[in-house]
Image (spheres, helix red, strand yellow):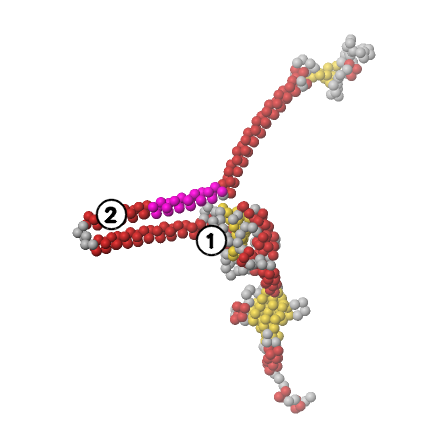
Amino acid sequence: MSEQGLDDRGILTVSELTAIIRAALEDTFPAVWVRGEISNFAIPSSGHYYFSLKDAAAQLRAVCFRGSHRRVPFTPRNGMEVIARGRISMYEPRGDLQIIVEEMVDFGLGNLMRAFEQLKEKLAAEGLFDEARKRRLPLFPARVGVVTSATGAAVRDILHILRRRNSAVHVLLYPVKVQGEGAADEIAEALRWFDAHPETADVLIVGRGGGSLEDLWPFNTEPVARAIAACRVPVISAVGHEVDFTIADFVADLRAPTPSAAAELVAAAAEHLRDRVAAARHAMAVTLRQAVAERRHRLRVLLLSRGVTALPHLVGTRIQRVDELAVQLRLRIRERLGGAERRLADARRRLETRSPVQRLRETAHRTVLAGRGLAARMQAILVAHRGRLDLAWRRLEAVGPRSVLARGYALCLDAGGRPVRTWQQAPPGSRVNVLLGAGRLGCAVETSRPDATDPDDGGTQD
């Protein structure tokens, strides 16, 4: 085809063609959801996200401009599987097909959220979230069970607040894992233990500090939820921060936004009682002052109205009587307040005497005393056995070979070291060793013969 045959109006430049393709793509795919794995992730100085979305068969370039980051609630990284929403476009300078991402969620997080909602709907349908089944916390808890990590910040905050707000309370910690594999099973087992031993705690605090959805997931599991619902001891759920909600929060008898807030709720009753006593004392004092002032005012008005201002002694007498009554009233109020305070102190002492801590101390003391008695008896038995052993040893030495030799007897051994028991074992000319009480003799046998009374007399060897 010659150049003259070409119509310039039908020829597109590269820029024009890529612009047409970009417009067609954006019109056809204004908003799509695509799932893939992030690769080649980069953040230049502009702050935009540049990466690729890929699966086993293909990949697609992607860009997420900084203005859209607020709809990406996590920091992307290579290897993460995500679901992205955006529009298909073309980067004209290079002719690259790309998706401009406007929103993105972690695919794994999406699975967790779906599981969360499914379990929430299931337990709600069973009535586990109903307010009617939830119990009120005891007004004055003396024993508080805590189910959390033994090394986390949550347990330190709980202990600090309980000791500061109500030092008489006894705390029993059941340490568990609060995240990762096996955490849910340990938490559920701790709850079942307290259910089996309700005398150990008046209220339970179950929780941990803040974290990601994955970190808090053990508190979103069915075993933990059912263990909370079945526990006979009232349960306070204190998981994460104020914005975090878990399945445990919905099932528990009360939700606290943080572990510290849970400790404040437990300690609030005793402090509330102290505040009420202080408020009553203040109100009674105010009432007393007002009553005295009113009586004085009425007395002055009465005296003036009857024209007895010239009788100062009468006024003084009445005022003095009012002062006496005021003193008596104050004394009675103090007596009543003192009685209330004494009753409160007596109740606290009774509460402390019932504390497991005191019982454990008494048990430990009895155990120490029993251990000391056992040690003394063992020592006496050992001394007796040692004495009998010494006596047996002395008797054995008395009949031993050395003792016999020391009394003048001798032991005859042949050249091989074997004992010579009969005269036939030592013929004339043989060598024998004679062991004495002190030393030995090397002897040559000159004659050997039996005793005159020997029944086996076989003659004499000369």
Q: Residue at x 26, y 52 (%)?
A: 296
96 within the magenta span: no
- At label 1, counting other C-alpha atoms closer than 10 Å, the crowd grade (few under 14, some 14-19, many 20 or more) is some
352 within the magenta span: yes
Res. 442 image quadrant: top right
The percent coordinates of residue 245 (x first, y second) are: 54, 60
The percent coordinates of residue 217 (x first, y second) are: 58, 58
Front-most of 351 and 188?
A: 351
Res. 59 image quadrant: bottom right
Residue, far left:
310
Front-most of 311 and 202?
A: 311
The percent coordinates of residue 404 (x first, y second) are: 67, 16
Please state the extent of the stretch shown in magenta in the rendering: 332-354
The answer to whether any part of residue 209 appears in the image is no
Horizontally, residue 322 falls left or right of residue 37, namely left
Q: Are marks 1 and 2 in contact (CB under 8 Å)?
A: no
Of the two numbered discs 1 and 2 in the rendering, the one whose residue sits closer to the viewer: 2
The amino acid type found where label 2 is placed reads Gln
Residue, far front:
306
Q: Which of the two discs, 1 and 2, labels the residue nearer the N terminus? A: 1
Instruction: Tell me the quarter of the image containing the C terminus.
Output: top right
Element carrying mark 1: helix
Q: Residue at x 60, y 61 (%)?
A: 125
Q: Which residue position is annotated with label 2?
A: 320
Front-most of 166 and 184?
A: 166
Residue, far top:
452
Q: Residue at x 19, y 54 (%)?
A: 307
Element carrying mark 2: helix
The answer to whether any part of residue 370 appears in the image is yes
Q: Which residue position is annotated with label 1?
A: 264
